[in-house]
Every structure is written in C-alpha cells, then in structure tokens.
Image (cartoon, rainbow, N blue to C red):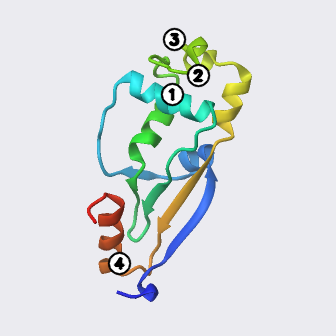
Amino acid sequence: MTRKDLEIRTNYVSLNTLLSREKLVFETETVLSVAAASRLIESILIDIPIGPIWIDRTGDQAIVIDGARRLRILTSFLNDEFALSGLECLTSCAGRKKSLLDPHFLRKLEELEVLVHSIEKGTSTEAKELIVKRIKGDL
C-alpha cells in the first residue's frame, strides 16, 4: 500500500450540518447509560473537544465507522430525549433536557464544530481495511 492508495478528506463540520444534511449509516448499536451520555454533553459544554468522526464514503452510503456513539448521544440530546444526570462539573444543569438549557450552553451545542475524517472513493480496499483496523485499535 502507498499514499496513492489513500483518499482521505479532513474538515471541521458543524454538528447541525452533519446531522441534518448527511444520510449517515451507523455501523454499530451501542447503548450507554444516561450518566455516561450526559458526561459527553457536559464535556462539550465545558469546552473539552470530542474525538473525530470517521466516515467511510467509498461506497453508496456514508457509513460512520468511528464516532457513531457520540453522534447518537448528541442526536438524542438535541431531540430532547434525555435529561442530564451524573454531571461532575455543571451540577446546576442536572435534570435539564436541551430545551431547558441556558442559552449560553444551547449555543455551544448548536455551534459545535466536529472534526470529520472521510475515507473517499478512490481509496483502495486494502487501504480502507488498514485504516479501519487502526481506528478500531487493532494495530
């Protein structure tokens, strides 16, 4: 495999754009506790960057190969599906759904920029398999 076999695009994309304009397919179904999901939201609200999202665009669908859990949590919270709990820093936000957040915190979620790495068409199958293996921690 050589660098010529790789076609990777890296961009910062707004969360709203990523969730509303993309038809994303999630590779796995993983459920976290509400407290664990809440800590992801809390991390964003206290300005801790979240990890990048990796998307495989080599086929007909955009498949999220890393970051699906983060995107699901964010989607659920933005859809007002759970209230924050188990917070360590922003305890004043405990029990609040998105609709009850202070405007300052709501703006942070609405303006969140997510680092997205896309494996594009033109990437060889061998290169894609190597990337996925490394992303998944199987070095």
Q: Nearer the viewer, mark 4 or mark 2?
A: 4
Is the residue marked by circle 3 packed among few (<14), some (14-19), or many (20+) residues within 10 Å?
A: some
Q: Amino acid at mark 2?
A: Lys
Q: Quadrant of residue 13?
A: bottom right
Residue ID for mark 2: 98
Q: Nearer the viewer, mark 1 or mark 3?
A: 3
The local secondary structure at tag 3 comes to loop
Residue ID for mark 3: 95
Badge 4 or badge 2: first in the primary sequence: 2
Badge 1 or badge 4: first in the primary sequence: 1
Q: Are marks 3 and 2 in contact (CB under 8 Å)?
A: no
Residue ID for mark 4: 127
- Distance in Å between CA atoms under marks 1 and 4: 35 Å
Badge 3 or badge 4: first in the primary sequence: 3
2 to 10, vertically: above or below: below
- Distance in Å between CA atoms under marks 4 and 2: 40 Å
Viewer-side residue, 21 vs 54: 54
| Residue 39: percent from left, percent from top | 47, 28
Residue ID for mark 1: 77
Viewer-side residue, 37 vs 79: 37
Indicate left or right for 123 with 116 as reference.
left
Is the residue marked by circle 2 packed among few (<14), some (14-19), or many (20+) residues within 10 Å?
A: many
Question: The N terminus lies in which quarter of the figure?
Answer: bottom left
Q: Amino acid at mark 3?
A: Gly
Badge 1 or badge 3: first in the primary sequence: 1
29 to 105, vertically: above or below: below
Q: Nearer the viewer, mark 3 or mark 2?
A: 3
Q: Residue at x 39, y 22 (%)?
A: 34
